[in-house]
Amino acid sequence: MKKFLAIIVVAILATSMSFAQHNDWVTTHANFDIAVIQPLTWTKTADVDLGAVITGFVKPIVANITFTLQGEATYGNLPYDVDINGTGPNAVDGVVLNGAWTGTGTVTLDNDGKAVVVYTTSNVDATLATSNGTKVFTINVDAKYSNL
Amino acid sequence: MKQSILILILMFGAIAYVNAQDVNFNSSVPETGNLVCHIIIPLSVSPNVHDDFLNFPTVPVGSKYNLGTHEHEDSDKRSYFTYSGEAGSAIELSIEFETIQDNVEINFVLRGTPKPPLGTPLQSIPILNFSAGKEIVSLSTTGKYYLHIDYNWVWAYENAEPGYRRFVQKVSAQYHNI
């Protein structure tokens, strides 16, 4: 009889333990990562006075305006790319400022998160100038992070 | 119940406000730069050739002929050039002298002024010495500069050959530092 009771008690305990493990909480995790990065900002060297050019002539002039772009340096070990576009200058009153951009296109920011864009003049062509006086040539750059 | 409705209304309003900002998380960042130049008129001179000595001096061999009683102070033999250009600009003058030919020598002095010469005493016009072969002067506020070559004397030395002589003085000018 004692043996029978002992078997019954063991059977009841085993059944109750089995029910206890039957519906435990099962957990998992989803991570939502956001990289908050600093916005792009520009600094530049001073505007340039190219001096005097005589109507009817082409004057060779080499001068630079340098734009420095500051952005986020790296995401983990990966550097950021930026798309940089440079436009201008347009002719003013028939006067043409010739030059070239360097540093534009898709550029990888350096270890400090910087990229340098330079506009270098080559000459001012006043051959077809329609008037004398001061002419202001404006150049523009814009940039944004690539693939964001 | 009313409180709950009020809270709901405020929540919907806030969401609508944020959406209305139309935030572009990667908009282009622009910058501009300016380059300035100054277009000026070309420098010109008039006349290109001064050639009007209708009564050029006749000088016997072995003699000196003064062109004015006080030489360059009142000489009536002069070449006179007017430069025109951008007002206030500096110009650079240089001259190639020709003073001796076949034992005949001429002597002259160069004077220049940005002021109109009419009514200006000759001796008040500054003498240009062309040190280092050139002279840097400024155009007037009307863009003018007046250059004189005032001839002082002609000397036909003893062994000069008789004949006609032409002495050419070539004056060149350009804007300074352009």
Image: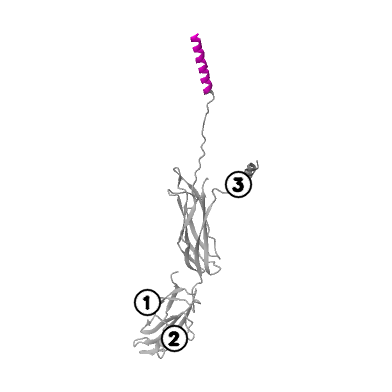
Judging depth in this view, the residue of A130 and A137 nearest the camera is A137
Label 3 chain ID: B
Say if mark 2 contacts mark 3, CB within 8 Å.
no
| Residue B133 is a magenta residue | no
- Residue at 40% in and 88% down: B71
Q: How is the model colour-coded?
A: one colour
In the rendered image, which residue does mark 3 sit on? B14
Q: Position of residue B127 (x, y in %)?
A: 40, 82
Question: Which numbered tag is attached to residue B131?
Answer: 1
Q: Relative to A25, is B82 above or below?
A: below
**Which residue occupies the extreme top position in the image?**
A1
Query: Helix or strand or loop: what does disc 3 sit on?
Result: helix
Nearest to N terminus: mark 1 or mark 2:
2
Chain under callout 1? B
Asked if residue B163 can be seen in this view, the reply is no
Q: Bounds of the magenta span?
A: A1-20
Q: Amino acid at mark 3?
A: Ala
Q: Residue at x 47, y 53 (%)?
A: A69
Q: Are marks 1 and 2 on the same chain?
A: yes
Disc 2 crowd, CA 10 A, few/some/many (<14, 14-19, 20+): some
What residue do we see at 45% from left, 51% from top? A114
Q: How many angstroms separate mark 1 from mark 3 (CA)?
A: 81 Å
Give the percent coordinates (x, y) of residue B20: 61, 49
Q: Which residue is mark 2?
A: B122
